[in-house]
Amino acid sequence: MAKEIVVMSVLLFVLAATTKADTQSGYGPGCSSLCNSSAPTHIHFYFHDKITGPSPSAVQVVSPPNKTSPTSFGTVYVMDDPLTEGPDPRSKPVGRAQGMYLSSDQVRIGFLQAMNIVLTAGPYNGSVITVLGSNHISDSIREMPVVGGTSAFRFARGYAQARTYFLDSNGLDAIVEYNVYVFH
């Protein structure tokens, strides 16, 4: 019960933090020439979600209450997944996806995904893009909203498209291609 309360508290905090209105006008200090673009910024990377093995990047923190659920409804994972330029896990690192995803669909496998895309390379090094939305992994392309960000992506809005590049035979480890389009 304590795990569920902690997970729900974290989820509510993420929702509140990403939807809080700011009463100031403009973008504020620290916004560089990368801000205020009229066309969206396109960021492309591969997300490596590894649940198995000795060094997983995602761990299950809450088990499904109903062990016979075909969708594992209620399961919660916390992630700190590496992001790379290419699909090979050894390709150049560009960031980390930090957050959680939880099985929120009782009919088909689908997750509520709340994550910060923490960029660690390139012109947006040190900036964060926050994504919060539905991720039905059986869909060929999934679209999730960008709900905010930090640094160059302060007040960001946009969307992230995810496409499964690789899913292991057990359906646990995955490589997902992301195209993120951000107005900032």
Image: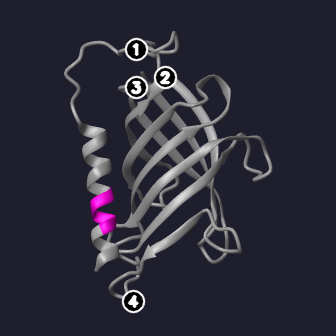
Secondary structure beneath label 3: loop
Dot 3 corresponds to which residue? 154
The percent coordinates of residue 141 (x first, y second) are 50, 49
Which quadrant holds residue 109?
Answer: bottom left
Decide: is 182 above or below 7. above
Q: Position of residue 57 (x, y in %)?
A: 61, 62
Q: Which residues are magenta?
A: 6-10
Q: Is residue 90 left or right of residue 32?
A: right
Q: Residue at x 48, y 30 (%)?
A: 181
Q: Specify which label sits upstream in the sequence, 4 or 1.
A: 1
First along the sequence among labels 2 and 4: 4
Mark 3 to mark 1: distance in Å? 10 Å
Residue density around tag 1, few if under 14, some if 14–19, many if 20 or more, within 10 Å: few
Q: Which residue is mark 2?
A: 152
Residue placed at 67% from the left, 75% from the top?
169
Quadrant into which the N terminus falls:
bottom left
> Does dot 2 land on a helix, a strand or a loop?
helix
